[in-house]
Every structure is written in C-alpha cells, then in structure tokens.
Amino acid sequence: LLGMAYYFSRKFNEAIAEGEKTLTMAPDYVPAYLWLGMAYEQTNKYTDAVAILMKGKTKTSGKNAKLNALLAHAQAKSGNISAASSELDELSIRAKRGYISQYNFARIYIALGEETKALECLTQAFDERATWLTWIKVDPAFDALHDLPKFQELMENMNFPKN
C-alpha cells in the first residue's frame, strides 16, 4: 500500500522503489504489479511498465480486469495501439459474460485519446459505484480530463471539493 500512497502523491520514483522491493519479498503479491506498472508509466518507462504489467497478468492468468486495463493503458501510451485495442476487445468480450467496471474501460479510452468515451465510462462507473473512482481526482492517468466540464460535473456529483 505504500507504493499506492507514493503513486497518488506523485512520488513515482519512491513508488517504483517500493514496488520493486515488495516484489523481491513477495513475487506473487499482485497489487505490487499494479502500482509498479503505473509508476513506471508515469516516469515514461513504458517498456518496463508493459513488462511488469504483463508479468502481473500472467500471475492472475489474465483474469484481473484492472491489470488488463492498466496493461492496455501502458501499451497505448507506449504507442502500441494495436496491443491496447486487443486488450480493450478482450475486456469487452469478458464484460458480456460478467461484471467489468466501466472505470477500467475509461482508463483505456483516456490512453487512446478518446476523452469523450472515457468520460462516458467514468459516468457509468459513478452510476455503478465503482470503488476506484474515489481516486479519480488524484490519479495522474486522468489529468487530461480535469478541465473538462463533464469531468467537473462528475466531481460535483461525487461531492469532491472544488480546486
């Protein structure tokens, strides 16, 4: 959890150090793959982000939707739109068979530069009461949306304080 705190505090190098240390001690601890991958991505270490998220995905046999979404996000940011789209397609198929939070789709769409779709998914995530939405204001992955009226409306609906 310290890696998460560093990530949301935008102390990405500390998040990386914590994630790497955690995985040395507990290589099967899946949340460390999430936070480490996101921190790598925020420091523009896309190759490392994709590699660690792929490794995390194998630890869960590809069944962790959050990992799939983070992997797609990192792939899109690295310029591998084809791989990101494949992950998006895979999640879309899985969502027809069971619950996948719209928050995960929003994360992929924002990386693909599809802000309107990302905001639609975030609105649906609000309606479904998605847990990860509580971090939306501090998650750097969504910084590009902060000034948009639809995002501001979402913040108001969530009763977040204005900046």
Image (tube, rainbow, N blue to C red):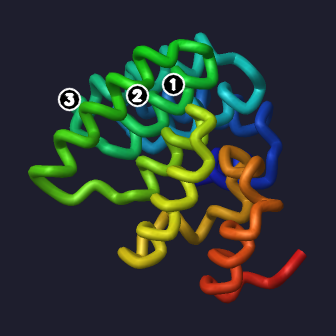
Mark in front: 3 vs 1: 3
Q: As displayed, is residue 136 above or below residue 9?
A: below
- Sequence-wise first label, 2 or 3: 2
Q: Label 2 vs label 3: CA separation?
A: 15 Å
Mark in front: 2 vs 3: 3
Q: Are marks 2 and 1 in contact (CB under 8 Å)?
A: yes
Query: Which amino acid is tagged 3?
Result: Ser
Q: Residue 157 placed where, x, y %?
A: 62, 85
The residue labelled by disc 1 is: 24
Q: Label 2 vs label 1: CA separation?
A: 6 Å
SS of the residue at dot 3? loop
Image point (68%, 67%), residue name: 151
Along the horizontal axis of the image, is 110 left or right of 51? right
Image point (45%, 29%), residue name: 72
Crowd class of label 2 (few under 14; some 14 to 19; many from 20; radius 10 Å): some
Q: Label 3 vs label 1: CA separation?
A: 20 Å
Image point (38%, 20%), residue name: 55
Query: Which amino acid is tagged 2?
Result: Pro
- Sequence-wise first label, 3 or 1: 1
Count of all numbered marks drawn on residues in the image: 3
The residue labelled by disc 2 is: 27
The quadrant in which the C terminus is found is bottom right
- Residue 14 image-quadrant placement: top right
